[in-house]
Amino acid sequence: MSEYHDPSNVVNPEHADHHIVTPGVYAIVFATLLIGTAITVAAAYIDLHIFNPIVALAIACTKAVIVILFFMHVKYQSKLVKLTVISGFFTFLVLITMTLTDYMSRAWGLW
Amino acid sequence: MDNATVTTHPHTHETAVPAEHEHVMLPQHRHHFETQEQQREAGTFGMWLFLLTEIMFFGGLFFAYLLYRNWYNPAFVAASNQLSIPLGAANTAILITSGFFMALGVWAAEVKKKNLLVIFLILTTLFGLAFLGVKYFEYKEKWELHHIPGASFDVSQFINPQAYGLKEKPLAPDMAQKTQVFFFLYFAMTGMHALHMIIGIVLLFWLTWRANRGEFSAGYVAPIENFGLYWHFVDIVWLFLFPLLYLINRHPV
């Protein structure tokens, strides 16, 4: 056993401190999510043609990112956890796009 | 960072100089992990891997929705307008509030405040139950209107909306039948979501009981933290379900 033993990898700044998110941050996130919901509902009543679903999904994605970063603490986690989350969304995108290419290339149904 | 270079025996955590050993392990420490921090991160990593499988699970339903909303758009518009926006928006706010209290519960566990943790877990459960209560009323309304897909499905409101006082464009009979596809996806997606909520609430009862016994206010917060990840994930699924199901096309005809 060498002299230098660093089991918690404390030398790596990621692991030195366990960051506790304060209730104040949570309250701001909470308010932001409620405002986002109100905007989504209001925007649904305005005719934005092709942009209606885009706006709705964009706001939903923003809310999801905020929940993931703050409520789920991912902003304060190690690179391992961040990479895991991102790979999840990458795989989801693969699910959607590859299934779409399957339908679009086979002239099933209405495509 | 004094403890960065302390030589410790891996199994007993003894140090050559006893005074150097300021690092105390929790009773729940498993010894294939060198430190509490590593154990906690491994637990979080594992929970996220499970959530990834859940993303793919719901992803399949979202894809089906994407396809059929494109193919049968008029039917989806008409069917979506049958859902109640006040109830859906209220449910979204209820679930966001529930998630807020869950996050506060994780904080309370981290700062070792037992009573606050129990209060926040109870509030999380109450708002979760409120969400399910609203869903019950919505489902009941669909049953009464014969909008549950199957033999008893009634398309007359979609073929002749004027007769029911609805400001909708009438649908041709074959397109009107496609509203069943919307309602099938509505019940499948919100039903699967509600099942996840029910499982979460059962777990919340168990966790609240354990929290009341002080199991999570002495430094060991992993179950609360990881359940929080699950609960927030279920919340995120609803954040997508609400605009996709309820808000397809609400501008005036």
Image (cartoon, coloured by chain):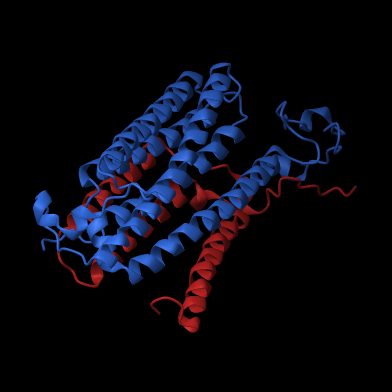
- B208 versus A11 height, above or below: above
Identify the residue at horizontal 51%, vertical 20% (top origin): B114
Q: Total number of numbered labels?
A: 0
Question: Which of the 4 image quadrants contains residue B222?
Answer: top right
x%, y% of residue B53? Answer: 59, 54
Q: Is residue A19 left or right of residue A29?
A: right
For image coordinates 58% across by 44% down, the residue present is: A17
Relative to B70, residue A32 above or below: above
Left or right of B253, for residue B55: right
Residue at 72% in and 26% down? B27
Residue A20 in sight here: no
> Can the viewer see residue B57 in this picture?
yes
Query: Is residue B144 found left or right of B222 in the rendered image?
Result: left
Q: Residue furthest top?
A: B213
Task: Between residue B191 and residue B163, name the one nearer to us.
Answer: B163
- Give residue A49's quadrant in the image: bottom left
Residue at image location 64% in from the left, 45% down from the top: B41
Report which colour depicts chain B: blue
**Residue B183 place in picture, x, y as percent:** 34, 52
Outermost residue on the right side: it is: A1
Q: Which chain is red?
A: A
* Residue A86 position within the rendered picture, expressed as x and y whole percent measured from the top left: 54, 62
Q: Quadrant of the C terminus of chain A?
A: bottom left
**In this rendering, position of residue B216 left or right of residue A93:** right
In the image shown, does B8 or B135 lie closer to the viewer? B135
x and y, in percent, of residue B153 in the image: 31, 50
